[in-house]
Amino acid sequence: MASDVDTAPLVGRAELVRTVRSALLGDAAHGQTAAVFLTGESGVGKTRLLGEIGDRLRDQGAVVLTGSCLDIGDASPLHPLLQALRRYDADLSASRARSSSAVRGLLQMVADETAGPDGAGALLERVSRGLHLIAEGRPLVLILDDLQWVDRSTRQLLLYLLAGLGDLQLSVLAAVRAESLQGAHPLRRVLTELRRLRTVRVLDLAPLGRTETEELAAAVVGRTLSGDAADQVWQRSGGNPFVIEELARDLRDGRDGLSETLREIFLDRVDALPQHAHAVVHAVAAGVEPVQHWLLAEVLRLPEDELIDAARAAVAHRLLVGADDGYRLRHRLVAEVLAHELLPAERSGLHRRYAEALTSAPAELHQARLAHHWRLAGDPARALPAAVAAAQEAERLGGYAEAHRHWSAALQLAADSGPLAVDRVELLGNAAEAAHHCGEHARALALLEELATLQGSEPTCALHIRRARYLAAAGRSALAEEEYQRALKAADCSPRDRAAAAARLAELLLHLGRYADAGERAREALALAENVEGSATEVVLASSALGFSDAFLEDPDAGLAVMRDALDTAERAGQPEDVACAYLHLAELLTGPLNILEEGVVVARRGAERVAELGLGRTWGTRLLAIAINGLFRVGQWAEAEKVVAAALRHRPSGADAVELLLARCRLSVGYGDIEAAGRDLDAVATLLAGGGARHVIPLLTLRSGLAMWEGRHDVARMAVQRGLTEIRSDDVMILSALVWHGLRAEAEAHASRTVEVDPTAVRRLRDVADRMARKSAGAARPVRSVVEGFLALCAAEVSRLDGSDPELWATSVAEWDRRNHPYPAAYSRLRQAEALLARRSRLATAGKLLREAYEVAQGLGAVPLTSEIRELAGRARVSLEEREPAGATRGAPTQASDDELAALTAREREVLALVAEGLTNKEIGQRLFISERTIGVHVSHIFDKLQVRTRVQASAIQLRNHRG
């Protein structure tokens, strides 16, 4: 079933194409016949594969005859063969007169055939001889489409030829529509006979998987699909390529609903079913999958034997899939099509029978399904309690997204239930909290506003606290702080509420980088919590904030101990959000101020797994993974960081959670030099950060400055830094020191490039801020001072670039960052030290060694802009970036070298190279690995450099050579 609109790429079938080509030409080349029969449902791509494989076989020198069977029984003997011969004759050029003559002779022989004493056997033998003449010693492949409609004469010819009775070396490739082979279909017997032959293979063509579905749809639409759109295409199509393409074109062209083409196709298939099978499909379409067999029996009320026969027919026609847990539609589109085929009374009757059956079987009761069926049966009064029970059940299991959906349904049912006594305030509160937990921050705030309006009085202290929590989660930190302050001043604020407000405000101040204020509020919260029973949540939040504050400002060991105790307390109390908060702050402390990166990454990833178990993967889990990404970035494990980014993106985060992840991904993009992707992420963060604090804004401005410098826009870099120094208040000398380094680097780059005038006022201000940070960090904990000292070393060295770069200052920076195991700033410092030495024409050997060391690190990371700058300097100085072989060394044998050819590639580069070797484009690789196309281009460029090749073919050859066998 091919589309007549436009041709989409062949996706997910590369291995199958290779298998079929090998089966057909491999066996035939050794003097044997061979055949492959592709079976599969309509639209799965059989016709497309026949064409693709046929083209490739022609390119290999085979004679390919292509024909299609017609749905007219035996009215046209040998029709597909005769059609194939006519097509082949039309395509022959004048230089192949002999072949053309043989084709026309065979066509004429069949046309003149009359019944005779020799019967069909003689005809088959003459056809075989005619095909032998056409082949002229070349491999001959007969490709037949829609073989389920094959006529009797062609069936006999296939058996004759494939049994080796004709003096002919040929291969057959045929496609069979699986749902048509029902009952006593004559082709079933033929295929049974042919399966016994060693050189015949019958392959079932399965639908595409989730990844391939998204890839095909994206190719048709012309862009990567949003998560919701990708989900919709996958659920509706069931992986059927034809359906995927049709749905994707509807998306691309902005069409709503279902196309008439798809509607008619599925209706024809349903209408072809026996009566009871037709009823089974309608019932499953109305049910919640999987529909268990006992439930289907209750709904349809058919005798068991008739129900089994009907279900078997629906499965055989490829409309249903049967499994141990029940029946499912093979394509959800069938439900959409059939929804319009029943009268409203018929539909509601089906749902009522489902609801009654579920109610009468308590052991099988599932509240979500019950609510669904009562609602569609038109009985909201009975659906409402089921929806509430389903929401409570989902919350108990940590399924906050499902709980939010059920609470929202309950709100709608309450509105439709008329005079029923329903506490709408309680429903709104539960729905808002579930929305908050599952990351639907805007929805949570909207529901909270509706609740406040419904209450009609002045906002209570508890409402202020709740609104502040939701605002903070949405990334609107300034408004959240104001709400907490209002809560603390509210007249109705109880000791518990006051402790909660103080603890949550301490946590917020911690996120804003105001550690002294956070510590003060945390102590206040702990004092208040002492007099409140059951205040584990407040104790955990306040302890985490206090521990972080103490570790940053005073005593790292004591602060770390407090935070570990907070995690233990949270785990004992068992509140999911408390556990998540404790993990988050512990991971932040380890990867940030304490600079214990490896342990911090482990804690962050373990915490992400734990909170996902608790149902908070989309929110807290995303933030924990963002911490892991930042830690991996700092220690130089960029390829591993990319994998964590891909895992985190599957949560589809929003609000502050999305900000954390986008900033983490942007660091990688800036390092890789993927300017377009980095700019996109920064713009998205800026949009999300309405009212955000220093924790996010300063890194945003730092990254924007770094990106602008790689683009050569040093004035833009300067403005970003100045904005950060002017507008943002923070105690975090670590993120401030990184910002100041970028400011001084921007001035140094402007001086070196001579494209922008150096701003003496900006330089003076930046130096003053650096001095203040040095004084301020002197009183901070030792690990904090250590990190700040590294940035201050960079600052001092950048200042020296304005007046003759000082190699000794850069040597100090190299030592500082080597000591902290941060390879990227260490490599950058080596580049600048070498640059300073070369400018002074001193210690040239040392400069060359520094450049080679920096180049090796930059290459290993995939840091393209840094690599390019190193190459440029090395080229100007005529410094070789490759290590020279020691005198007297001999070259290894070629076979020995292959083991080490890929040693220089990172893990991510090896993944990319393997996909390049499969023949995938950069876009296809990006979709497979969840990375932008531009980033893949960066990786490919880097692979070429390391392998010293110029083309994808050369790179693929090395990959295959190293993985042969």
Image (cartoon, rainbow, N blue to C red):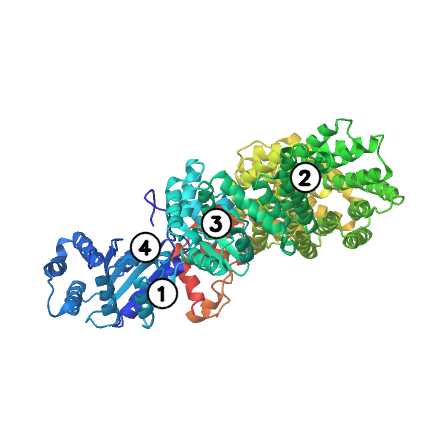
Q: Answer with mark 2 or mark 3, whichever residue precedes in sequence.
A: 2
Mark 4 surroundings: few (<14), some (14-19) or many (≥20) residues within 10 A: few
Q: CA distance from mark 4 to mark 2?
A: 52 Å
Q: Is residue 362 left or right of residue 196?
A: right
The residue identified by callout 3 is 927
**Where is residue 549 shown, x and y percent of the image?**
79, 45
Callout 3, which amino acid?
Gln
Instruction: Mark 2 vs mark 3: give the one in front.
Output: 2
Q: Answer with mark 1 or mark 4, whichever residue precedes in sequence.
A: 4
Q: Residue at x 70, y 50 (%)?
A: 396
* Residue 848 seen from this side: no
The residue identified by callout 2 is 431
The residue identified by callout 1 is 202
Q: How many marks?
A: 4
Q: CA distance from mark 1 to mark 4?
A: 18 Å
* Element type at mark 2: helix
The residue identified by callout 4 is 52
Contact between marks 1 and 4 (CB within 8 A): the answer is no
**Where is residue 732 shown, x and y percent of the image?**
73, 41
Q: CA distance from mark 1 to mark 2?
A: 53 Å
Q: Assign the C terminus to one quadrant of the image.
A: bottom left
Callout 1, which amino acid?
Val
**Where is residue 525 shown, x and y percent of the image?**
84, 41
**Where is residue 552 shown, x and y percent of the image?**
77, 46
Q: Answer with mark 1 or mark 2, whichever residue precedes in sequence.
A: 1
Q: Answer with mark 4 or mark 2, whichever residue precedes in sequence.
A: 4
**Residue 847 in the image: above or below residue 529:** below
Which of the two residues, 343 or 236, is positioned nearer the viewer here?
343
Q: CA distance from mark 1 to mark 3?
A: 31 Å
* Element type at mark 4: helix
